[in-house]
Image (cartoon, grey):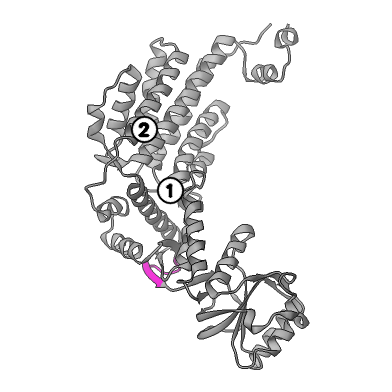
Amino acid sequence: MIRQIKYEDGREKMADGIHSLCGTLSLEGGILVKGSYTFSASEVAKEMEGDDSYFNQGIRLAAAAIGEINFLTGCGTREAATVMDSLLSVCIKKAASGVNPISFARDLKEASESLEKSIMEDLHSSHQSKADLIGQITKDPQITDLVLQGGEAGELVVKESMYAETRLEITKGIRLDGPLSVGGAGTMTEVLVLVTNRTLSSFSEIYPLLAKLGEDHLFILADEIEGEALTLLTANTKQKRLHVWAMKGPGMGRRKADIMEDAAALTGTRVFDGIYPCEMKDITPKMLGRAKTLTMAGSYAIIAGNPDSNDISMRIAGINKKIEAPETNYYDKQKLRERIAGLSKSAPVIYSGGDTLVQAREEKRRIECAVAYAQTIERYGIYKKENLQTLMLKTEAEVILANVINQSIKEPEISAWLLALIIRKSCSLLYLWLTTGAVLVSSGYDREDMELIKSGIDVERLRG
């Protein structure tokens, strides 16, 4: 006999999970998780999960939908959670009134597609200044001014600071984070640059190049520096027989390769692999790059080269194409913008400060949200909530969706792209919740039965 389950109870528990997560994320500010404030839906969801699998499934579904919005835009967590929570309440009432959930889910999906299309066709430039848009999130005029100043100077990057004060620094060149392997802190001009994606361990391999340097200064950026090469370079540099500084390339994998290629392009050289166009021992000073200035500190180095070259312009154009690609998420875009900042004439960096590391991280996230929101509005425009009232809403589902948005979004204007994503992901979440429940209740199969059926097993014979 086919095992029956009380799926209505399970569906209610899934709804409780969605409500719980959305209610928490719709609050102002970050959520304290294990001593750190976070805006991450997935991190909050993990801490809220309990013993009930249905409740946990509801939390995970909501976290996935909200997380994807934040993944693509870098903001919108609170707005998305508020809309989902309100829309779920409407769906629960409709389901309780005896409405066919499959039919209502289909209507809701069609309504979301229609409303999303109307929003993207009715874009406007915001009448609010960029300062007002950023100030809505930062809630601090001084931080807003720093963001505006940084944005005017170039591609703005936000990082954590070790100090209590939030500050803006504008540098010229590529910043390479990490300690120096060879050499001490200082600033030099007209420095030769060797970039190699190899591990330097043999001193004899680079000795022919060092012998040709004379009084020239050399900066080495390598995949790794170890063994004999590290020992002898350090010893000769300390005794001032060589004027050499060296460090390991920052990052990992593709990101490390990109940074090293950027540094090579900025200084007018290439990344040497020891094979093409020649072996390491055959490299000459003429083949090396040249940095106009090299600034070295305990935890980073800054290389300033020639940002006006054609190679740099082509490289920046290629990075911009990656940023504009639909599949590139917000966080990858931020890393790409960091590269553009380093290749440009100036690289503005805001260091978010706080009395504690927790405060610094919360400040960093708030600034990032402000910058991301302003960027989406600059690129896609805004949508005015009052325009919802002028739309020709044809179905009950469209009316419900428009009312939920109107009641859930506080500001009279919102990023059009962000609103379209919220509508799409919210309705997809509720469509899944409605149809999954209907299928299991109407068929009488539980979750294990459904998995067996998908695998081609005759459940009727197995259970009989």
Q: Left or right of 344: which side holds 286? A: right
Q: Quadrant of the C terminus?
A: top right
Residue position marked by numbered label 1 in the rendering = 74
Residue position marked by numbered label 2 in the rendering = 83
Residue 181 shows in this picture:
no
Residue at 26%, 30% in the rendered image: 388
Give how far across and how far down residue 133 sits, in percent: 28, 51
Magenta region, main secondary structure: loop
Q: Is residue 414 above or below residue 289?
A: above
Residue 168 lies within the magenta run: yes
Please tell me how many numbered marks the rendered image carries.
2
The residue tagged with tag 2: helix, strand or loop? helix
- Which callout, 2 or 1, points at the residue further toward the start of the chain? 1
Give how far across and how far down residue 107 sits, in percent: 41, 18
Residue closest to the eye, 29 or 371: 371
Kindly identify the amino acid type of the residue bearing the numbered disc 1. Gly
Segment colored magenta: 161-170
Residue 453 placement: quadrant:
top right
Residue at 71%, 71% in the rendered image: 277
Residue closest to the eye, 428 or 123: 123
Residue 251 shows in this picture:
yes
Residue 165 lies within the magenta run: yes
Q: Is residue 391 above or below residue 290?
A: above
